[in-house]
Image: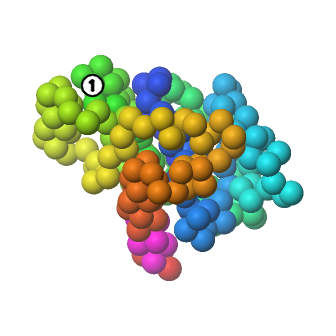
Amino acid sequence: MIITVAQRKGGAGKTTLACQLSVALLKNGFRVATLDADDQGSLTRWAGLRQARLDKPDIYHEKGAGFALPSCIRRARKNADVIVIDTPPTIDKNVTRAISAADLVVAPLQLSPLDLDASLPTAKLIGSLKKKTLFVINRAPPRARVADLIRAKLKESGLPVASTELGNRAAFAESLASGRGVHETAPSSLATQELTALTAEIAGQLVSKRKRAA
């Protein structure tokens, strides 16, 4: 099963979400591979930090975009039950390939009017490719009137939005600095509780899709 993390808006938290989901899925018993389709290479650097901490890597990693993407996916499939693909903040042929390969597209979205407007091309592309999608509210503020207005607009738009929101928590970024996830560095934190709930939503969708395919 392939999860592609995609969002045209830069700074939405794609790589952070890709890393955190990978560790969370690993902790849920899945064999996980990560695939970095972003030339910035942030996911690759995180994977390198993680590998340096361990005697052997527990998450298989590939880096490749463009025409190399299909071969990277084939190799990753030999080593994993779930492949998590990180993509650049744009809409181009590379992102289209990554979305086309996905069983589920996860799109992080911050609660601001600019972020919502910038997300519409991503939603349009995913819709045109007829891919299952889950928009994830990321870095949600504890209280903000504008955030409530964006939530209302999302509900009106009919976009598939995860019931779990991820707060604006330092624990997410802090864990990545050592190649880990919040499940490993802050297991009792609110960040881990939120991520656990989100992962359960995503895993449920993957399992149901697998059962339908069988």
- Judging depth in this view, the residue of 184 and 2 nearest the camera is 184
Amino acid type, residue under disc 1 in the picture:
Ser
Percent x, y of residue 200: 42, 64
Q: Which residue is farthest top?
A: 114
Q: Residues within 10 Å of mark 1 (few under 14, many from 20)?
A: some
**Res. 114 image quadrant:** top left
Percent x, y of residue 167: 36, 40
Position of the N terminus, as image quadrant, is bottom right
Instruction: Give the overall secondary structure of the magenta segment.
Output: helix
Q: Is residue 205 above or below residue 164?
A: below
Percent x, y of residue 110: 34, 31
Count the numbered circles shown: 1
Q: Which residue is farthest right?
A: 55
Question: Under tag 1, what secondary structure?
Answer: loop
**Res. 156 image quadrant:** top left
Q: Is residue 29 above or below residue 152?
A: below
Relative to 92, 156 lies left or right: left
In the image, which residues are magenta? 205-211
Taking the spot 84% from the left edge, 58% from the top edge, the residue there is 56
Magenta stretch contains residue 121: no
Taking the spot 61% from the left edge, 62% from the top edge, the residue there is 26
Relative to 11, 120 lies left or right: left
Asked whether residue 44 appears in the rendered view, the answer is no
- Judging depth in this view, the residue of 141 and 22 nearest the camera is 141
Tell me the residue that label 1 is attached to: 112
Taking the spot 53% from the left edge, 51% from the top edge, the residue there is 186
Percent x, y of residue 58: 74, 59
